[in-house]
């Protein structure tokens, strides 16, 4: 058994401007273009716009994988998931026990920690280390999407619902939820439920906490100062199957109900083909409905922070787990590609950071930043010591929000799913796809997703064109050689763990 990582010395203390509360919001498959602040003609996201106006939007914000499970594993660790062999769905896994993760580091520094939402790092089951209550979260409400094809149902979470759905329960994410590790049920639309649980956890505000009137999750007595919190909200919105909406939401949008899969009606893949783009009638409208509901709940959380006097001392980050899924009617324009691919549309995501008085407001930054940067950024903001010898691939975001120029972020970002790889620098993008990979054919057939083939080198800092026609390999062999060498060195480092 690998030795446990050294545990940081706890540094308890209240939230202050130097030691903020932290709210991390991670959505699911949110398209890069689907923000009204980007001029979308039909996506209405006033509260994400409001968050952006109070902070900095990173135009070149990336996640470490084009699919959810390895991307989420990298985020929670602040390190490339390839270090423990997590590349694609079939190899993804939560970081090993020898590596402390984000809530463990912040918890040891005196933060109370809460997780509310989707868990999907791999094929995790109840009681595994991947469960939030097993890796440093004090309070939690979650569903295990690794048990259900990466999905959580938006409406049905109980043992009774599982029995009613029968064999179809797994593919639709119909399952009980877990509250602090104990099985529970939920009969409410999951998006507002997760937001409400997060607000209950964040508490009633400094005055109420100091008077001993805080919520039960505050973890403080009447005489002591409130602890700062780290709250992670992992919405399953806007993942397919987005038609799973409450009746009042359907009626408000004049949308028809759409039945979940009936296992007696047809083969699952035949049914699934009619449940994604371009065959699902009203598909974009269902997707936008889930997006608008999530945006509304983000607004409620921001309102809660303001009403409780915490907003000025709270670092809020919003991003999604991978690029928008065009088969679920998300849009990544003008970026090429979608979830599953290493085109920009698969890995470049909405990425917003807001911390009043510290992060510049109303700014757009161009530096290359990553979801891996969140752990070192939060640890630095919290004054949380890092374990000796802990290898991180992320870096503190502060230089990138202080300087909005393209050179302020990472000099290079690396991506590798095993059958496709990419290197992104401020100016160039090198992408390789094995044309014979079985995953490529599967994605094309099942998800209607073309991830490309072969090698392309494009000046991505100048345009979003990643087509074969834009390939500059022949014109710039020196750049091709340089980025190839960078990727080979990185890959060797990952293999070493």
Image (spheres, grey):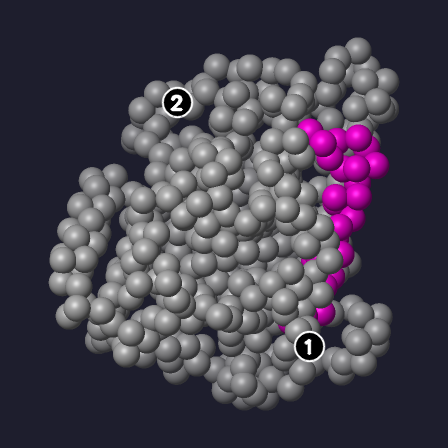
Badge 2 vs badge 1, beta-carbon distance below 8 Å: no
- Residue at image position (75%, 13%) is 224
Q: Toward the viewer: 355 or 73?
A: 355
Position of residue 98 in the picture relative to residue 316 (left or right): left
- Tell me if residue 9 can be seen: yes
Position of residue 332 in the picture relative to residue 191 (left or right): left
Give the secondary structure at mark 1.
Answer: helix
Q: Is residue 291 above or below residue 214?
A: below
Query: Range of the magenta residues?
Result: 285-313
The residue where tag 2 is placed is 387
Q: Residues within 10 Å of mark 1 (few under 14, many from 20)?
A: some
Dot label at residue 285: 1
Instruction: Find residue 256 and report its horizontal and vertical position in percent.
Output: 76, 83
Q: Is residue 390 above or below residue 260?
A: above
Using the numbered discs, state the Cα–Cα distance from disc 2 to disc 1 in whole angstroms.
47 Å
Q: Is residue 404 above or below residue 466?
A: above
Q: Main secondary structure of the magenta part?
A: helix
């Amino acid at each position: 058994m690998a030795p446990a990582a050294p545990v940081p010395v706890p540094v308890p203390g209240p939230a202050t401007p130097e030691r903020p509360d932290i709210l991390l919001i991670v959505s699911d498959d949110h398209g890069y273009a689907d923000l009204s602040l980007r001029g979308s003609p039909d996506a209405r996201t006033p509260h994400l716009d409001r968050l952006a106006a109070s902070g900095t939007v990173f135009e070149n914000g990336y996640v470490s994988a084009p699919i959810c499970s390895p991307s989420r594993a990298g985020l929670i660790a602040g390190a490339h998931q390839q270090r423990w062999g997590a590349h694609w769905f079939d190899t993804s896994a939560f970081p090993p026990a020898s590596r402390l993760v984000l809530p463990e580091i912040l918890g040891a520094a005196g933060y109370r920690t809460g997780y509310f939402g989707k868990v999907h790092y791999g094929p995790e089951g109840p009681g595994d280390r991947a469960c939030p209550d097993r890796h440093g979260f004090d309070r939690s409400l979650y569903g295990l999407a690794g048990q259900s094809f990466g999905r959580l149902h938006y409406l049905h979470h109980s043992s009774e619902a599982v029995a009613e759905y029968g064999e179809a329960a797994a593919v639709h994410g119909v399952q009980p939820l877990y509250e602090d590790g104990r099985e529970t049920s939920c009969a409410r639309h999951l998006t507002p439920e997760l937001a409400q649980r997060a607000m209950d956890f964040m508490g009633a505000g400094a005055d109420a906490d100091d008077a001993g009137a805080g919520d039960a999750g505050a973890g403080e007595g009447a005489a002591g100062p409130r602890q700062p919190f780290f709250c992670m909200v992992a919405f399953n919105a806007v993942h397919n199957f987005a038609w799973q909406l409450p009746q009042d939401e359907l009626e408000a949008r004049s949308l028809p109900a759409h039945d979940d899969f009936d296992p007696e009606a047809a083969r699952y893949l035949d049914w699934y083909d009619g449940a994604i783009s371009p065959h699902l009638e009203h598909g974009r409208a269902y997707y936008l409905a889930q997006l608008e509901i999530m945006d509304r709940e983000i607004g409620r959380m921001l309102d809660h922070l303001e009403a409780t006097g915490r907003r000025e001392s709270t670092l809020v980050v919003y991003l999604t787990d991978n690029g928008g899924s065009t088969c679920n009617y998300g849009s990544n324009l003008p970026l090429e590609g979608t979830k599953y691919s290493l085109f920009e549309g698969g890995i470049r995501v909405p990425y917003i950071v807001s911390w009043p008085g510290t992060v510049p407001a109303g700014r757009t930054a161009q530096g290359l930043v990553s979801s891996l940067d969140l752990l070192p950024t939060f640890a630095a903001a919290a004054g949380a010591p890092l374990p000796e010898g802990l290898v991180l691939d992320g870096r503190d975001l502060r230089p990138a929000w202080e300087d909005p120029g393209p050179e302020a972020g990472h000099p290079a970002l690396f991506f590798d799913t095993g059958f496709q790889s990419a290197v992104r620098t401020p100016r160039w993008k090198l992408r390789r796809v094995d044309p014979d990979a079985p995953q490529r054919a599967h994605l094309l057939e099942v998800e209607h997703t073309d991830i490309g083939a072969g090698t392309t080198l494009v000046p991505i800092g100048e345009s979003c064109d990643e087509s074969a026609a834009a390939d500059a390999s022949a014109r710039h062999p020196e750049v091709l050689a340089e980025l190839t060498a960078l990727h080979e060195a990185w890959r060797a480092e990952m293999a070493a763990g």
